[in-house]
C-alpha cells in the first residue's frame, strides 16, 4: 500500500510543479511580448513590423 500512495503523492507533486512552471512560462512570455512591443515603437526591426508584434 505504501508504494501506491507514494506514487500518487509523487504524481500530485509533479503535476503541481508542471502547473507552476507553466504559469511562470506564461508570465515570462507575456512580459517578453510586452517588452518587445514597447521596444518596437522606438526601434522597429524587420522582424517587428513583418510579424505584427
Image: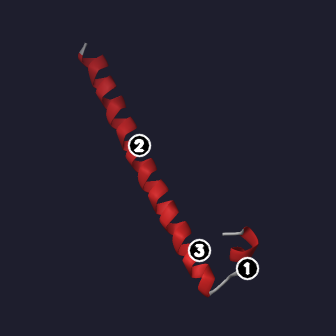
Q: Residues within 10 Å of mark 1 (few under 14, many from 20)?
A: few
Single out the residue that lies furthest toward the left: 2
Q: Position of residue 48 (x, y in %)?
A: 68, 75
Q: Residues within 10 Å of mark 2 (few under 14, many from 20)?
A: few
Q: Position of residue 34 (x, y in %)?
A: 53, 70
**Which residue is depicted at the point 68% across and 81% down?**
45
Q: Earlier in the sequence, mark 3 or mark 1?
A: 3
Q: Earlier in the sequence, mark 1 or mark 2?
A: 2
CA separation, marks 3 and 1? 13 Å
**Which residue is depicted at the point 41% across and 43% down?**
19
Q: Earlier in the sequence, mark 2 or mark 3?
A: 2
Name the mark nearer the viewer: 3 or 1.
Answer: 3
Name the mark nearer the viewer: 2 or 3.
Answer: 3
Identify residue for label 2: 19
Identify residue for label 1: 46
Using the image, determine if residue 7 lies above or below residue 22: above
CA separation, marks 2 and 3? 27 Å
Taking the image as shown, residue 47 lies to the left or right of residue 17, namely: right
Q: Secondary structure at mark 2?
A: helix
Residue 18: mark: none
Q: Secondary structure at mark 3?
A: helix
Q: Quadrant of residue 41?
A: bottom right
Report if the CB atoms under discs 3 and 1 are less than 8 Å apart.
no
Using the image, determine if residue 38 lies above or below residue 10: below
The quarter of the image holding the N terminus is: top left
Residue 37: mark: 3
Q: Secondary structure at mark 1?
A: helix
Q: Nearer the viewer, residue 50 or 15?
A: 50
Report if the CB atoms under discs 1 and 2 are less than 8 Å apart.
no
CA separation, marks 1 and 2? 35 Å
Amino acid at each position: 500500500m505504501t508504494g501506491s500512495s507514494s506514487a500518487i503523492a509523487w504524481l500530485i507533486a509533479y503535476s503541481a510543479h508542471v502547473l507552476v512552471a507553466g504559469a511562470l512560462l506564461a508570465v515570462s512570455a507575456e512580459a517578453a511580448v510586452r517588452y518587445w512591443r514597447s521596444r518596437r515603437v522606438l526601434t522597429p526591426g524587420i522582424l517587428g513590423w513583418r510579424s505584427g508584434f
